Amino acid sequence: MPCETNEELVDLLESVRGTTKLGKVADYIPALGKAEAKDLSVAIYHVENSCMSAGDVEKLFTLQSISKVLALAFVLMDHGEADVFELIGMEPTGDPFNSMIKLETHNPSKPLNPMINAGALAVTSMIKGSSKDEKFDRLLQFIKLLSNNDKISYCKEVASSEFDTAHLNRAICYFMKQHGIIKDNVEDLMEIYTKQCAIQMHSMDLAKIGAVFALDGIHPETGERLIRDDIARICKTFMVTCGMYNASGEFAIKIGIPAKSGVSGGIMGIVPYQFGIGIFGPSLDEKGNSIAGIKLLERLSKKYKLSIF
Ligand SMILES: NC(=O)CC[C@H](N)C(=O)O
């Protein structure tokens, strides 16, 4: 859909672009280190199917941790709440996304929530399918439906770069396997998870997915229900309590909308019954959130009184 460039949005974006200099792009996944720190884009997709965008909207980026909330919705539909939350908790950790410390201190061992790596890996291990390819293809198909874009695919370079270097995630998997949280072959699970994190799109695709959540699971363009409303509500609640890693509390106070970020610099935001927001700004703050993206959302939220609280 052609999108209007809205002058107010362009001004807002340019007013925060300078903050990209204060952060740094993630490079623990080597291929992500190639991103350009100054890039910044924002797209807004209204539930009545109008949209606007500003900045470097032609840039593709990988979902990384944003995929965690989409995989959660998918797996909750496949298995139901009881089975998923028997293995994965509902509480924020206050720790970085890749921390495994609470896996050991919690008895019986259980990832505290599905937005940290441990919980997300356990969620991905629950995707149904007879092979690793079928499992990934089913998730990808769901994400194509959410974005209403059949061209969505994953970035092979980013996936294999993470696969080759994901030693900590492998350690988390082996720990969970020892404790019976996952049963999979760890290499197969890592392949699915790294491909899932490497699914790439434009900020407008992400804004559109946000709009599906804004409508409690109905796609604004097709009118199709893609996520059950009770599951969309669970996902939005996790986004509020743990969507922005261990900065979720401050984000809730300053911005106050359900949101999920990823280390590629993506942020999906949801303004219930109004619009979805897709942001890409690879320069990150020390917690791993897009530094200019957060500033942009803060200004947007203050200006238009978007906080849900
Ligand atoms: N915070 C993130 O975006 C983390 C996702 C990344 N693929 C990882 O597991 O490390």
Image (spheres, rainbow, N blue to C red):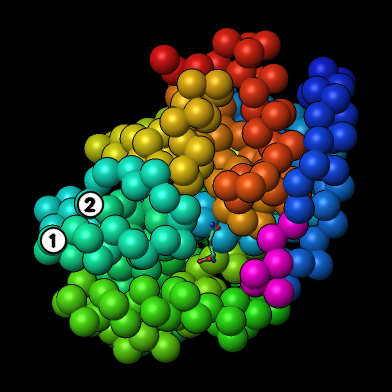
Residue span colored magenta: 25-30
Tell me if residue 173 comes above or below residue 3 in the rendering. below
Please tell me whether the stretch drawn in magenta is mainly helix, strand or loop.
Answer: loop
At horizontal 59% and vertical 77% (from top left) the residue drawn is 162
The image shows residue 48 at horizontal and vertical percentages of 57, 25
Instruction: Say whether residue 35 is visible.
Output: yes
Marking on residue 89: 2
Label 2 and label 1: CA atoms lie apart by 12 Å
**Residue that mark 1 sits on:** 107
> In which quadrant will I find the N terminus?
top right
Left or right: residue 263 versus residue 169 is right
Q: What is the three-letter code of the residue carrying label 2?
A: Gly
Tell me if residue 16 comes above or below residue 146 in the rendering. above
At horizontal 58% and vertical 47% (from top left) the residue drawn is 287
The image shows residue 194 at horizontal and vertical percentages of 52, 74
Tell me if residue 19 comes above or below residue 32 in the rendering. above
Under circle 1, the secondary element is: loop
At horizontal 22% and vertical 60% (from top left) the residue drawn is 105
How packed mark 1 is, by other alpha carbons closer than 10 Å (few <14, some 14-19, many 20 or more), is few
In this rendering, the label closer to the viewer, 2 or 1 = 1
